[in-house]
Amino acid sequence: MYIGLYMKKEMHIEKSLHMQKELQLYIHIPFCVSKCAYCDFLSAPGKPEQVETYLEALMKEIESCKVWSAGYQVSTVFIGGGTPSILNEMQVERLFESIRHVFILKENAEISIEINPGAVSEGLFACYKRVGINRLSIGLQSIHHEELLTLGRIHTYQDFRKTYDTARTMDFDNINVDLMSALPGQTFCTWEKTLKEVADLQPEHISAYSLIIEPGTLFYTRYHNSSKTCPQPNSHDTAFPDEEQEYIMYQNTEEILKTYGYHRYEISNYAKKGCECRHNLGYWERKEYLGLGLGASSLINETRWSNVEHMEQYLGIIKEAQKQLLTLQEQIEETMFLGLRKSEGVSLEKFQKQYKKTVFDVYGRVIREMSDKGFLICQGDCLKLTKRGVDLSNYVMAQFLEMDC
């Protein structure tokens, strides 16, 4: 936790901050109305009094950063969860008063918040405007009622349309919509309809993820004893798409969205030109970021740590976060597997400038092997995945984790 953590780190940080550096800020709100069947995020339903108690502790944590925060300028803020739209207007205003009291926000800072369809009133949208929120991320997932029910979502497509239309009326001009493919009962036709219907609305950004069944989720309980494409006997659940159908969904997503003016800038993310999510780009480019709230992770001065994940420990601020000073090899590995997620890939010039050796000095054999197989290509200053490489990205990136740097 930062109050304990930074009493020990304070001197080290202050000595390194002779000028303001860029910092990304993540704020975690771990509450939701109900837990979705696929969700493995650190979140759970919360009563109003629990939300208020947590917010008080969160603001104390923010205040504990004041000693060293003057050395940074915050370029992006991302309020995630859970469902941050569970906070009411007064709570949102108090949270941002605390943030602005402690941190210096750049004039053009990207400030995002995740919201659920049907969960934000005009008054709350107006509050978002007042505090400086300028980017919305709406968790739709599907336009089809049956698919939403299977996922455990508590909204309808009509709820989404009302929320989206209200946001536009309130002059929000940077909106992301989250979508999910490879769902139980989903076909390419229903996925295509979801993509086209949402793209017709012309949000600035679309995140299109494939469903992954994670341990600890309701989906894992239902399906872990059977193959993904074959539900357990006597199960009420609809079968997942087979591998061929899932591959067709994945392959055609980029082509469909391209016809609506979206370009793919990361494996699962598409944007209008100039509307890429700056906060997420910062993660993939290994910019420094500070996570505040339950379980939030940070990376500063090549030191990585995470807050405790148990609410009682967090509220008491009695247990220090787990810190991990990254080795040079870990830094290089992160640069590769995060950078290759981006469509533009890894900059050869930046790699050499940062690590005082070329990427070929470190990964020459792997790059040759992956290039010979058609998975990697070097274009100008960039080493990046080919279209075939994107399809097998997990395999390709794993090769960069098995080398001795």
Image (tube, rainbow, N blue to C red):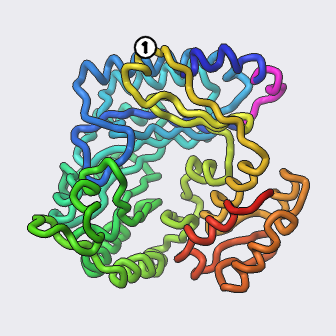
User: Quadrant of the rendered structure where residue 338 is?
Assistant: bottom right
Camera-side residue: 178 or 171? 178
Q: Mark 1 packing: few (<14 Cα in 10 Å), some, or many (20+)?
A: few
Badge 1 marks a residue whose secondary structure is helix
Q: Is residue 109 visible?
A: yes
Q: Residue at x 36, y 47 (%)?
A: 40
Is 348 rendered above or below residue 375? above
Left or right: where does residue 378 sit relative to residue 253? Answer: right
Is 311 rendered above or below residue 378? above
Over which residues does the magenta segment extend? 13-21
Q: Residue 321's x, y, as percent?
A: 56, 26
**Which residue extends farthest right?**
356
Q: Residue at x 63, y 31 (%)?
A: 323
Please name the amino acid that badge 1 sits on: Gly
Q: Residue 352's x, y, as percent?
A: 87, 58
Is 329 rendered above or below residue 42? below
Q: Residue at x 64, y 37 (%)?
A: 304
Q: Residue 200's x, y, as percent?
A: 35, 70
* Image quadrant in which the C terminus is located: bottom right
Q: Residue at x 77, y 63 (%)?
A: 347
Camera-side residue: 133 or 140? 140
Q: Residue 231's x, y, as percent?
A: 20, 69
Would residue 157 be counted in the magenta stretch?
no
Q: Which residue is mark 1?
A: 316
